[in-house]
Each structure stands twice: as C-alpha cells, then as structure tokens.
Image: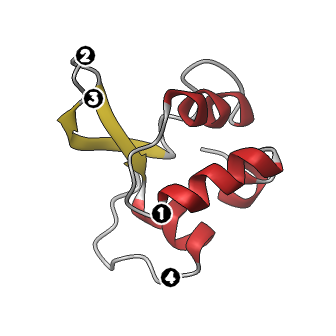
Amino acid sequence: MADIAAVLGRLTAAELEEIHATGPQGHLSRRIVEALDRAAGGPGGGRGYYVPAGSVSGTGSPHVVLRSDVAAWLFGHSAPAAVVDPA
C-alpha cells in the first residue's frame, strides 16, 4: 500500500474539503471513493484507505469510511492501538 500522505496528496482541494465535511467516521460518497481509487493508482486502488462501515445504503451498497489510521492522519488524531494493517 502506498504512503497515506502521497495518496491523500493526490486528491483535489474540493475532494479533501468533502472528506473534512464528512468527518473522520462519516460515510464516504461514491465520488470520494472514486477519487481515493484514482489517487491510489486506479479502479479499486484505494480499497486499503477505506473500509466497510457495517451498514448499507438504501440501494444495498455498503457504506464505507476512512480506515482509522487514514482518518487519524487526515484529521490529526491518534489512531487506535489495535489498527490492523490490511497490506
């Protein structure tokens, strides 16, 4: 998995604003998931940066949130000690 700073550095200012508006545990929009994928190298490339939230939308799509260490890096909080690196 690429460096968090490098991937998030490839997002546009508008994309970062949307993530900040959503908050560290907010459900990511399809647009942001696609932006993370693009920034991480292409379709599905950002999957390690977001994880399922455990709920689904009205259309049956799983809600996704930033992985805890990605959220911690972006929002400036400490990541929980028990973060599991999926890489």
**Which picture quadrant has residue 82?**
bottom left
Residue type marked 4: His
Residue denoted by label 1: 23
Q: Determine the secondary structure under disc 2.
A: loop
Query: At 80% from the left edge and 53% from the top edge, which residue is drawn?
Result: 9
What is the crowding at mark 3: few (fewer than 14 residues within 10 Å), some, or many (at least 20)?
some
CA separation, marks 2 and 4?
Answer: 32 Å
Indicate which disc residue 62 carries: 3
Choose the circle earlier in sequence order: 2 or 1: 1
Residue type marked 2: Thr
What is the crowding at mark 1: few (fewer than 14 residues within 10 Å), some, or many (at least 20)?
some
Choose the circle earlier in sequence order: 3 or 4: 3
> Which sits in the foreground, 19 or 37?
19
Residue denoted by label 4: 77
Query: What percent of the width, then of the height, locates residue 43?
Result: 61, 18
Query: What percent of the width, then of the height, locates residue 81?
Result: 33, 79
Q: Are the residues tagged 3 and 2 within 8 Å (C-beta)?
A: no
CA separation, marks 3 and 4?
Answer: 25 Å
13 w.r.t. 33: above or below:
below
Q: Determine the secondary structure under disc 1.
A: loop
Can you tell which of label 3 and label 2 is closer to the viewer?
2
Q: Are the residues tagged 2 and 4 within 8 Å (C-beta)?
A: no
CA separation, marks 3 and 2?
Answer: 9 Å
Residue type marked 1: Gly
Residue denoted by label 2: 59
Q: Determine the secondary structure under disc 3.
A: strand
Q: Colour scheme used in the picture?
A: secondary structure
